[in-house]
Amino acid sequence: VRQRIAVGIGETVKQVLTLSLAPLKLSTIVAGAPATAAQGVVYRIDRADGDKARIARAVGPEAAFTLPPGRYTVSATLAAYPLSAVQEITLAAGKPTEATLTIEGGMVSFKPPAGIVASDVYWEVVNDKGSAVWRKTGLGAKTLLAPGHYKVRFEAQSTRREADFDVRA
């Protein structure tokens, strides 16, 4: 809001400026359940029109903002996992808006073959393009993955195994 106000010497001027803003509440569903603080949801809000500048950022399972009316691109990214969701939102002045972003995925657990007791176990998951999307060391391993086709690689001592698997939303 811009307004030019003339002020004379020794004069007191009072002016009320009205800002047309819109409240926005965001939440995220991850793999069918409400997001938790441990998942580290990072919200980013960018203008969808004009300069497409970053407007706001917040961390947590839910976030609240007060923004000028307009179109925005809202994203929710999990800090702990390589998953995200993007949604375009239009805000109108004075009209509260609530939006829920949905991050599709599935929790996957891996266990070593019978007889493996060493702690120096290495796990790697690659996507259908052959790119590594997750790595871990230790006997038990668990991660959240986006829907798709994957291959898990297991290495311990002189044992090496691979297996294909799918994650469905």
Image: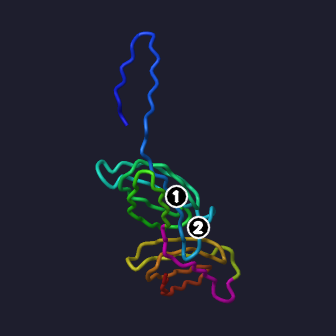
Q: Dot 2: within a 10 Å radius of its alpha carbon, few (fewer than 14), some, or many (20 or more) residues?
A: many
**Residue 100 lies within the magenta run:** no
Q: Which secondary structure lies at badge 1?
A: strand
Residue type at mark 1 is Lys
Residue furthest out toward the bottom: 114
Q: Which secondary structure lies at badge 2?
A: loop
Residue furthest out toward the left: 50
Residue range (magenta): 101-116
- Colour treatment of the image: rainbow
- What residue sits 45% from the left and 55% below the top? 95
Residue type at mark 2 is Ala
Distance of label 2 from label 1 (alpha carbons): 14 Å
Residue 24 percent across, percent down from the top left = 49, 56
Looking at the image, is 142 positioned above or below residue 24?
Answer: below
- Assign the N terminus to one quadrant of the image: top left
Q: Nearer the viewer, residue 12 or 155?
A: 12
Residue 120 percent across, percent down from the top left = 65, 73
CB under 8 Å between discs 2 and 1: no
- What residue sits 47% from the left and 59% below the top? 97
Q: Nearer the viewer, residue 71 or 18?
A: 18
Query: Which residue is identified by label 2?
Result: 35
Residue 107 percent across, percent down from the top left = 57, 78
Q: Nearer the viewer, residue 38 or 156?
A: 38
Q: Quadrant of residue 18?
A: top left
Q: Quadrant of residue 71?
A: bottom left
- What residue sits 63% from the left and 63% below the top? 38
- What residue sits 44% from the left and 47% below the top? 21
Label at residue 25: 1
Give the mark nearer the N terminus: 2 vs 1: 1
